[in-house]
Amino acid sequence: MTSPETVLWLQERTSLGILSPEVLNAIAQVIEEQVVSAETDLVSEGTPPAALYILVEGQLESNSTNPALACGFLPGSVIELKQLLLEELTPFTITTVTECHLWVIPAAKFRALVTQYPEITQAFSRQLVQELAQVTSALSYEQERSVALRPYLVTKAQRGIVGTSRYAMRLREQIREAAADRKSVDIFGEPGLEKDNIAALIHFGSPKRREPIIKVNCGILQTSGADLFGRAGGKAGLLEWLGEGTLVLNNIQELPEELLAPVTQLLKTGTYTPASRSGELAAQPRPSKARILIVSEKTQPTIERSVGHIIKVPPLRVRKADIQGQVEYYTSLYTRSRGVSKPHITPEALRRLQSYDFPGNLKELKNLVERAIVQAEGANELTEEIFWPAETKKKRFRLNLLNAYPPLRRFLRSPWWPDRINYGFTATAFAIIVAVLFIGPQTRDRNFVLNLFWAWWWPFFLFLFPFLGRVWCSVCPFMIYGEITQKLSLWLWPRKLKRWPREQAEKWGGWFMFGLFSLIFLWEELWHLENTAYLSACLLLLITAGAMIFSALFERRFWCRYLCPIGGMNGLFAKLSMTELRAQQGICSASCTTYQCYKGGPQKGEGLETNGCPLYSHPAQLEDNRDCVLCMTCLKACPHRSVEFNLRPPGIELWTTHVPRTYEVALLFLLLGGIYLHRLPELLSWLGLQVDLTQFWQHLGLSLLVLIIPAIFTFAAYGLLQVLNFNRKPRKFVELAYGYLPLVLGGNLAHYLRLGLGEGGRILPVTFATFGMGGEQLPILVAHPAVIAFLQGTTIVFSVLMTILLTQKIAKQPVRALLWQHLAAIGLGVSMWAIIVF
C-alpha cells in the first residue's frame, strides 16, 4: 500500500483520523507490516508497550483477570496508543483469534514522532477531555434516571415457580417463552398469586436483564398520563427514562379510562404521545423501546388483543400437588430469616391443607405457614391442629362420621360390608323369597314375603332415604345376581366386556327408567300386585333379568347406574339425604396417581385391593348422591384417607351445586302421580265420581290420567308464576321442580305407613299361615288407626313445609314471588290428606 493510500486508510478507518495529513504521512513512513498467526499473544498484561499496533485484517480479543476489561478488536483498531502516550503498563493480554495483518510502529519510533509533532499529544488530550465530558454527561443522566426510576424499581425476582405439577411446569415453560423475545405480555389470575413476581422472572430471564425493570400501579397514574408519557416540551416520563428496560403495569383493571387508548396504542405500535396542556399543539408520537408487561386479575378485551403473550396463572386450588413444595419453601424461608430450626409438617396437616381451596392463594398459604411456625413455638412438627383455615363451601356444615366414629370406618372397610352380607345372606334369601312368592299362598294376609315386601320394605326404605340415601342399592339382590352372572359368564366365556356407551346412556337412560317405572305403576294398579304373590315375583325377576343381561354385556353395574327403575327412584330421593360420601379433592389431586377407587387395583398402603367403583363414579367428583350406592369400595381402596362419609344439611346441593335433569323431573312427577294412583278408589270417592274399575280400559285410561294430572297442576302453577311476576323472571321449571321432592317422598311414605303400621306387625301369624300352620294365637304389633292417621298427617304437613322451604332455597326469591308454587304444594298436600289420612 502506497503512502497516500495509507494516509487515506488511517483517516477513514482509525481513531488517528483526527491528526493532520502531515502527521499521518510521517506515521505512514515508519509503519512496518507484520502478519501474526492465530492463537498468538500480541501483547502481555502488565508489560511496557513494545509498539503501536494498527489492525488491518483479522480479529483480536483481550484476556484479563478483570472481566470488565475484556473486549474484542476489529480492523481499524489502534492498540497501545494510550499506554505509549501516558507511559503506562499494558492492562490486559491481547491474543489473535484469526491470522492477523498488522501495521506496527516500534515504541522508540513512535515516541520520536510524538517529540517531533506535539500535535499528537494535544489532539489526544482534546479527545480525552471530550470523552471525559461525555462520561460526565452520561453519569449525570444516569443519576437523574436513577432518581426518576428508583421509587418503582424492581431489584430482583423473589423466587422461581415452586412445584412439579403440570400447571407449574406449563407456567415455567410460558415464562421461558415470554422471556425469549420482546413482545408484551398479559399476566392475569386471582389475587395472591404473585403475578408481579412472574413479570420479574420474565425480565430477569431475558437478554435485557441488565436493563432496569419498574412496576407502576395503574390506580395511581395521572389521568393525563404525564407521569408515564411525560409532557410535550417539559418533564420526561417514565417511558423515556426507562429506555430499553421493562415496564410492569400492575392492576391494569384500575387503569383510568382516559389512559386505556394511549396504553393500547403503546402496546400495538410501540409509540406514545406525551401529554400536552389545553391550548397547546398536540405532541408528535414518540417511539418506545421499553417492554410492557401487564398484570391483572382478569383479562381486559382491548388489552388482550394487543399483547404478544397471554399467561393465565393457575390458582392454588388446582395445583394441590404443589402445596407440599410451597409449604417446604415457605417454611425454609421463614426459619432461615429467623434463625430457628425447621419443623417437619405431618401428613395429616398436609392433607388438611390440600383439602382447603385457598381463596387467597399463595399469599394466604404463606401467612398460614408463618402463623403455624409461630404457634408451634419451636416444636419439631407442624401438626393438623395448628392449621385452621376456613372451610370451603363444600366442607361447611359437614361432620366426617368416619373420623368421629372409628368403629364405623373399621366396619365399612371390613369384608362384612357389603360382600359378606350380599353373598352370605341376600343372594340366598332372595332366591327363597322368589320361590315362596311362586309356590306359597297368593294373598298378603297369608304370604309373609308379600308382607315383607309391601309392609316392611317399602315404608322402611322410604323412611331411610333422608338418612342414608341410596344405601339399599349396596345390598340390592338385583345387582348381586347381576354380578354373579358377570363373573360366571367371564369364567365360562373369557372375553373383554363392553365399555359403557356413556353418551347414549346419559341421553336416553333416564327416559328408559321413566318408561319402565310407568309400566310398573300401571301393572301394579291394574293387576293388584300388592296382593298377588306370583305377579310380585315376576316383577322382581324381570328387574333381576335386566340386571343379569346388562351385566353379561357391559362392565360393572351399567344397569344399576342408568337403567334400573328402582335405582332411578333411589337416586332421586337420595338427593334429600343428610349423609354423603365424598372425597377431599385436594388430597386426590395432590397425592393420588393410581385412582384405584375409580379404576381398581392391588393393595397399596392402607388401601385394599378392589375392582374399583361399580358405578364408575370418582368420589372427589360427585356433585350429588344420585350416582353413589354407598358400597364403600372407594373407602377400602383409598390409601390416603381422602374418602369421607359426612353428616350434612339434608339435600344441601339442591340449592348449591345441583345440576337439574329433565328426565329426573319427569320421574319425580311420575312418583307424585303414583301416590294418587295408589289411592285411586279413595280419590274417586273424594271427588264424588262413579267409575267402574273392573272395566280394564276405563281403569287404564283413568290410571294414565291420574299419573299425568299432578304434573299438569304443578306446571300450571309455574305458568302463573311467569305471568304474575313479569318484573322478576323465575328460575326454570326444571330447577324449581326439585322443590316438590320432599312432598313426593312424604306422600309415598304416608301411603305405605298404613301397610307398615297396620300389617307389618302381623308378620308372625302370616309366616305360619304361609306354611299352612295356624298362628292365630301368635303376638301381633299394630298401631291404632288414629295413631296411623296422626303419623300420616304429620308426615304430609312436614313434607309440605319442607317443600316450601326447599323451593325458597332453590329459587332465592321472596315468598311473594313464589306464592303460586307454594299454593300448589299446599293444594297437593291437602289432596293427599283427603285421600290418605281420611
Image (cartoon, rainbow, N blue to C red):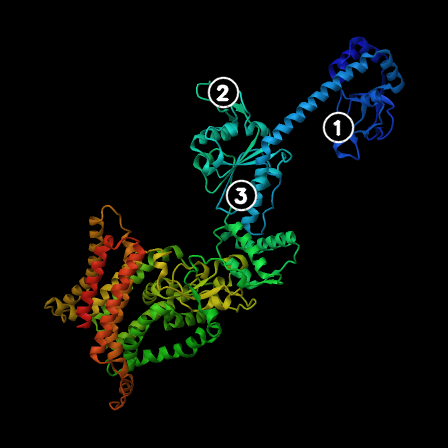
Closest to the observer: 210 or 40? 210
For label 3, the residue is 195
Closest to the observer: 514 or 581? 581
Asked whether, in this view, residue 181 is left or right of residue 502, the answer is right
For label 2, the residue is 283
Inspect the image, locate mark 1, and give the three-letter code of the amino acid beneath it.
Gly
Mark 2 / mark 3, whichever is N-terminal:
3
Residue 636 seen anywhere in this rendered image of the structure: yes
Report the mark closest to the observer, 1 or 3: 3
Separation of disc 2 and disc 1 at Cα? 42 Å
Residues at marks 2 and 3 touching, judged by CB atoms closer than 8 Å: no
> Is residue 704 shown above or below 119?
below
Separation of disc 1 and disc 3 at Cα? 40 Å
Report the mark closest to the observer, 2 or 1: 2
Mark 1 / mark 3, whichever is N-terminal:
1
Q: Secondary structure at mark 1?
A: strand
Q: Residue at the spot x=53%, y=20% of the render? A: 233
